[in-house]
Image (cartoon, grey):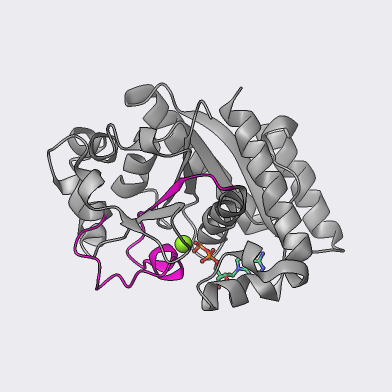
């Protein structure tokens, strides 16, 4: 892939950022793509689901950003519990303090610096951001080529889109002109809901039809089950058929963006 680093973000918690990052990682796992997941959320849900106890990880994304060495992340990346193709830069406990750091402009490039020379070893790098538009998310965007927004088709979900787009624009103009809005993924689309359909139409108008990736992710119990078992959705076989298909298509969309 030509462009390979994507930050998955939204300032809201619980909208499915980690679900999308891990669903794409699961599709990449099934496709045999060497993938790095960067966990920027102190809650460490992605790290945990990828089989790494945050307490057992000696170093993580916060340490990588604190280091002044280009490529510092190389020594902090660990193999995930999903096998040898999926790797992780775990979350670290100092991420919360870092997020409140107001010296944004002087430190926003630190994740990019920590990943310098590291990303070329991977086919895909997925940065799972925290529910915040603070420094860490700005660092994630500064290190990415694509911003992937995760949105729920509700009134509140849509109200949250503009501030995220503003941050993408800000990081693009001040720090990282390679950054592109890769797309918007809709999560938890109900099968029948005229309200949700109206929100989808509104979202298409807001960001442009081309930016809204298809298909949307349906609400499925299996998402929680996969997280609970710390396993890729693709390991569940036929009982996960529709979710597997959705994430395969989303990975396909990501690869088209990456080669565009
Ligand atoms: N499409 C879905 N179907 C069922 N459960 C979902 C879905 N998307 C997310 N969830 C569940 O909702 C919760 C929040 O999702 P998560 O991905 O952790 O959000 P975020 O990373 O944005 O905080 C988790 O328990 C997750 O398993
Ligand atoms: Mg999360």
Q: In percent of the image, x 46 and y 47: which residue is there?
A: 35
Is 93 located above or below residue 17 in the figure? Answer: below
Q: Main secondary structure of the magenta part?
A: loop
- In-image side of 38 versus 68 (left or right): right
Q: Quadrant of residue 106?
A: top left
Q: Report the label total.
A: 0
Q: Quadrant of residue 88?
A: bottom left
- Between 123 and 106, the one nearer to me in the picture: 123
Q: In percent of the image, x 42 and y 39: which residue is there?
A: 122
Q: In percent of the image, x 64 and y 44: which residue is there?
A: 251
Q: Position of residue 54 (x, y in %)?
A: 29, 70
Q: Quadrant of the C terminus?
A: top right
Tell me if I can see residue 217 in this picture.
no
Tell me if I can see residue 200 in this picture.
yes
- In-image side of 62 versus 218 (left or right): left
Q: Position of residue 138 (x, y in %)?
A: 35, 41
Question: Which range of residues does the magenta coloring cover?
Answer: 32-60
Extreme-left residue of the structure: 68
In the rendered structure, does residue 58 fall within the stretch colored magenta?
yes
Is 220 located above or below residue 122 in the figure? Answer: below
In the rendered structure, does residue 180 fall within the stretch colored magenta?
no
Q: Position of residue 252 (x, y in %)?
A: 68, 40
- In-image side of 177 versus 30 (left or right): left
Q: In percent of the image, x 75 and y 44: which residue is there?
A: 214
Q: Quadrant of residue 255?
A: top right
- Between 53 and 19, the one nearer to me in the picture: 53
């Amino acid at each position: 892939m030509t462009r390979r680093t994507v930050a998955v973000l939204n300032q809201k918690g619980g909208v499915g950022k980690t679900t999308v990052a891990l669903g794409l990682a699961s599709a990449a796992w099934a496709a045999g793509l060497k993938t790095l997941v960067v966990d920027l959320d102190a809650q460490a849900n992605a790290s945990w689901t990828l089989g790494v106890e945050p307490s057992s990880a000696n170093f993580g994304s916060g340490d990588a950003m604190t280091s002044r060495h280009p490529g510092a992340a190389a020594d902090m990346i660990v193999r995930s519990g999903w096998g040898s193709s999926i790797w992780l830069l775990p979350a670290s406990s100092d991420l919360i303090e870092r997020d409140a750091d107001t010296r944004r402009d002087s430190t926003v490039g630190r994740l990019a610096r920590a990943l310098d020379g590291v990303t070329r070893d991977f086919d895909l790098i997925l940065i799972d951001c925290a529910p915040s538009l603070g420094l860490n998310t700005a660092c994630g965007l500064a290190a990415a080529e694509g911003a992937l927004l995760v949105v729920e088709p509700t009134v509140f979900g849509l109200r949250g889109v503009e501030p995220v787009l503003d941050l993408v624009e800000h990081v693009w103009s001040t720090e990282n002109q390679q950054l592109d809005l890769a797309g918007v993924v809709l999560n938890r689309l109900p099968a029948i809901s005229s309200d949700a359909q109206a929100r989808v139409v509104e979202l298409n108008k807001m960001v442009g039809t081309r930016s809204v990736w298809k298909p949307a992710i349906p609400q499925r119990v299996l998402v929680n089950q996969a997280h609970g078992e710390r396993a890729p959705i693709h390991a569940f076989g036929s009982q996960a058929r529709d979710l597997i298909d959705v994430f395969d298509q989303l990975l396909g969309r990501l690869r088209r963006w990456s080669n565009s």
